[in-house]
Amino acid sequence: MNWKLSCVWSVVALVVGWVVGTAATAYAIGPLNSTFATYSYTDPSCNAVTDPIGVVFTNGSGAYNQPYQHAARFDHGMWSYGGSNPGQYFWDDTGCTTADWDAANGSGNSSRSHMRWEHAQTTDAGQAYAATPHYEEWVQDTWLTGHHCVRPGGFSTGRSGIAFQWITNGNKHPYYSWSYWGNTFAPLKCDGQTVGGDGNVLYIDMYGI
């Protein structure tokens, strides 16, 4: 091969390698605190903040509904509602996508604890699920309609419920820790109230006793 052709192939290889490397970097698996955004969103561009991440379930199986499978157990609160089309959007290493799953301990027309989550692979916490637990009151508008309302303190109450059922009440998941994410922004919620979290995130290892 003459030197001119050799140089051409070298440049092509360099460009291809750079493109492949760039693509790999763009979707690289990162640490937990850089893989997920700190909120969920109401729009498919992940611009309109709605709920703060309050719990991250770490070292899971990778099944999208694993947190629901745990929450549905009698010793984890018997949450009986959940599904794969829960609305809202999350940002992770693949971009802005719809939430993967949700779970609740009450039906759509009752006050309840509720959470949505997004799954992603991380380098330091395995298969992880960033979740937005909250307590939401059912407000009856008329005898035909109503809506859920997260009031001040609703995000902390939702997270505390998870902590009690998964950790405190029998220490079923003894490997846990806290991290401050600073996601305290308070968006406008129902009835004209602004509601935010305290910025603290509870990490719960899916491995249990």
Image (spheres, rainbow, N blue to C red):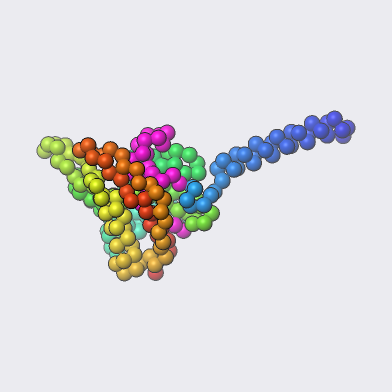
Nearest the camera: 42 or 193?
193
Residue extending farthest to the left is 143
Identified at 26% across, 49% down, the residue is 154
Residue placed furthest toward the right: 2
Residue 27 at what x, y percent from top left?
55, 43
Image quarter of residue 6: top right
Q: Quadrant of the C terminus?
A: bottom left
Image side of residue 17 versus residue 206, left or right? right
Determine the residue positioned at 44% across, 49% down: 119
Using residue 34 as the reference point, say whether residue 38 is left or right of it: left
Q: Is residue 52 magenta?
A: yes
Q: Can residue 100 be spotted in the picture?
A: no
Q: Position of residue 186 (x, y in %)?
A: 31, 42
| Residue 57 image point, x, y percent | 41, 56
The N terminus is located in which quarter? top right
- Give the x, y percent position of residue 102: 34, 48
Q: Is residue 146 visible?
A: yes
Judge whether 115 appears above or below 44 on screen: below
- At horizontal 35% and vertical 67% (from top left) the residue drawn is 172
Q: In this rendering, is residue 123 above or below 190?
A: below
The reply, left or right, for residue 47 in relation to residue 75 is right
Highlighted magenta segment, given as a residue range:
36-60
Q: Quadrant of residue 60?
A: bottom left
Residue 44 falls inside the magenta stretch? yes
